[in-house]
Image: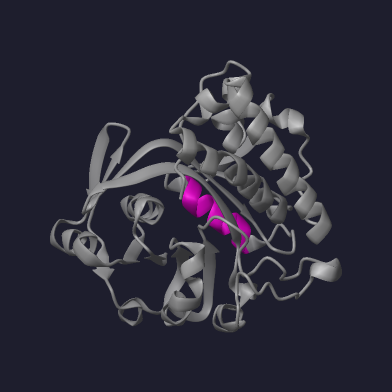
Amino acid sequence: MKITVFGAGAIGGYVATKLALAGHEVAVVARGPHLQAIRAQGLALDDRGTTRAARLRATDRAEDAGGRELVVIAVKAHAMPQVAPAIAALLGPETMIVPAQNGIPWWFPYRAGGALDGAAIAAVDPTGGVGRQLDPARVVGCVVYIAAAVPEPGLVRRFGGNMLVLGEPDGSASPRLARLADLFGAAGIKIETTPRIRDAVWMKLWGNIGFNPVSVLTGATQGRMVNDPGVRAVLRAAMLEARASTRTSTRASTRAPMSAISRPRCCRISRRAGRSRSTRSCSPWSSSAAASASRRPCSRRSVR
């Protein structure tokens, strides 16, 4: 498949390298010293001690890598109004878009049903330009659970997590969703597909709202935070407030009980190497927070 990853930082670089090493024609849109290093020597991936490099087409001009079958967006969500025109230059008639981003995305109201269906979210897409240039009908929703960093230009290092949650905005089990699940799975990325992708988006955001700022303030890992009674109380209060806000503002509220903090949800369906199988793995952010609280091994997750 012809794929462009727009934004070749930690997450985008990891996904791009995995797909390229699996044999796909991958281009990346990057900038600065990272771009120069990729052009000169390829993009190297240190995957928990095993390092491999992929030769990728690298550019800072998206129009030079147009006509793609798939575009993975891996820039910060707040940059979307500025970069949407460049991303639009990559799109052909049938191009799929997978936004690998945190937060509430521009496509969130698309085919949501109820009062949310088709609504504008001014905080996300202030002028509506992102939605006009990047048609939500192209989107397969995505939530990222990969911990990675760029320690130096031209090198991506993964230190934990290896899962993408994918889902159609309308909840359907579409052929393109199955195709993407097989694509990423065959590249060695664990995949969960869901008919409730907005719940998955909220779950990730729910964890980020509580854990990310408190982690910055304390300098502690998620495991340490949940095992400290005082810090745990602050986390719980923040998450309860966030849950109340979602119930007030949208029907797509976080439904998980607060006991999720102390009990991991397991037995997920993953796809690897083009086939489905049941596997025991901790649920997304509980792989660190809830797993620690229930005395299971935890892993760090990047704050993107």
Q: Is residue 269 above or below residue 155?
A: above
- Could you tell me residue 153's position as x and y percent? 21, 53
Please tell me which residue is depicted at 30% across the width and 80% down the height of the picture: 64
Q: Is residue 276 above or below residue 280?
A: below
Residue 110 vertical position relative to residue 98 in the rendered view, above or below: below
Residue at the left extreme, as displayed = 40
Q: Is residue 111 visible?
A: yes
- The one of 211 and 97 positioned closer to us in this rendering: 211
Image position, residue 250 (x, y; %): 80, 60
Coordinates of residue 215 in the picture (x, y in percent): 49, 37
Residue at screen point 73% across, 52% down:
196
* Magenta-span inclusion, residue 45: no
Pick the front one: 28 or 9:
9
Q: Nearer the viewer, residue 277 or 120?
A: 120
The N terminus: image quadrant: bottom left
Residue in the picture at 49% in, 46% down: 185
Image quarter for residue 277?
Answer: top right
Left or right of 243 on screen, residue 219: left
Residue 11 position within the rendered picture, expressed as x and y whole percent measured from the top left: 41, 51
Residue reaching furthest to the top: 295
Q: Is residue 117 above or below residue 174?
A: below
**Span highlighted in magenta in the image:** 176-185
Name the dominant secondary structure of the magenta segment: helix
